[in-house]
Image: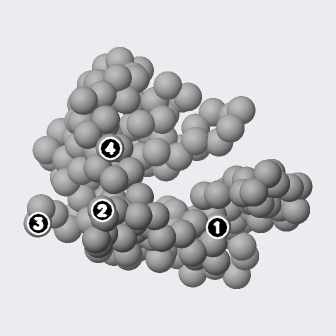
């Protein structure tokens, strides 16, 4: 829609995902692996955190909208945008804190409130999924249709499944086949 979008994640695998959607990946060089074998983000060194904060702060100076989503199961949400970083943002910018119900990725956010700090609006709405249920349902159904279409061929007699069980995507979403578990998460072979 013409927006200039950038995204950050400590997980290296996210870079390809971000770029595949046409966004710019904000990269912090690392000598360490910030991802668990299960694909989740893990704690990083203090040096990495310092470099990450510097890089994010530079990006925040130019941002119109910042959406934060980081959560850690069983723990408060990590702070991604602190008060000083909000202070470098331009007046009129907006922070959407999707983690506000677990403490927030911005310490200035408040559950159920819109807070203004130095001209920056910080949205702390709760239950975002409930606020956008109609749009979320339409988006989900469109994504599901596009996903399934990759495994259907049309021709004489109508559409037919074309399932290549060696396809990386199909292997990643198939839990069981022919009466046996096939996914590593189900077989216990996950690292």
Numbered-mark total: 4
**How many other residues sit within 10 Å of disc 3, few (<14), some (14-19) or many (≥20)?**
few
Of labels 1 and 2, the one closer to you:
2
Label 3, label 4: how far apart the Cα atoms are: 24 Å
Dot 1 or dot 2, earlier in sequence: 2
Q: Are marks 2 and 3 in contact (CB under 8 Å)?
A: no
Label 1, label 3: how far apart the Cα atoms are: 34 Å
Residue 186: x %, y % from top left: 80, 51
Q: Are marks 4 and 1 in contact (CB under 8 Å)?
A: no
Please name the residue that numbered disc 2 is placed on.
158
Dot 2 or dot 3, earlier in sequence: 3
Please name the residue that numbered disc 3 is placed on.
2
Q: Are marks 2 and 4 in contact (CB under 8 Å)?
A: no
Of labels 2 and 4, the one closer to you:
2
Please name the residue that numbered disc 4 is placed on.
141
| Residue 21 as seen in the image, left or right of residue 1 | right
Dot 1 or dot 3, earlier in sequence: 3
Q: Are marks 1 and 2 in contact (CB under 8 Å)?
A: no
Q: Which secondary structure, mark 1?
A: helix
Label 2, label 4: how far apart the Cα atoms are: 21 Å
Residue 178: x %, y % from top left: 75, 57
Residue 91: x %, y % from top left: 15, 46
Label annotation for residue 171: 1
Label 1, label 2: how far apart the Cα atoms are: 25 Å
Dot 3 or dot 4, earlier in sequence: 3
Q: Are marks 3 and 4 in contact (CB under 8 Å)?
A: no
Q: Residue at x 39, y 37 (%)?
A: 97
Q: Quadrant of residue 7?
A: bottom left
Q: Residue at x 38, y 51 (%)?
A: 144
* 183 and 1: which is toward the camera: 183
| Residue 146 as seen in the image, left or right of residue 180 | left
């Amino acid at each position: 829609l013409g927006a200039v979008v950038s995204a950050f994640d400590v997980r290296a695998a996210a870079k390809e995902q971000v770029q595949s959607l046409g966004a710019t990946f904000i990269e912090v060089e690392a000598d360490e692996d910030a991802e668990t074998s299960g694909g989740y983000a893990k704690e990083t060194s203090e040096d990495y955190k310092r470099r990450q904060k510097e890089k994010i702060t530079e990006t925040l100076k130019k941002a119109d909208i910042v959406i934060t989503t980081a959560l850690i199961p069983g723990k408060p949400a990590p702070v991604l945008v602190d008060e000083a970083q909000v202070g470098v943002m331009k007046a009129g910018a907006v922070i959407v804190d999707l983690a506000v119900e677990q403490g927030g990725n911005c310490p200035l956010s408040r559950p159920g409130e819109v807070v203004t700090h130095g001209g920056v609006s910080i949205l702390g709405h709760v239950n975002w999924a409930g606020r956008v249920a109609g749009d979320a349902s339409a988006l989900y159904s469109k994504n599901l249709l596009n996903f399934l279409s990759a495994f259907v061929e049309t021709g004489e007699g109508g559409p037919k499944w074309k399932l290549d069980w060696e396809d990386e995507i199909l292997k990643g979403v198939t839990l069981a086949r022919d009466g046996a578990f096939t996914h590593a998460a189900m077989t216990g072979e996950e690292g």
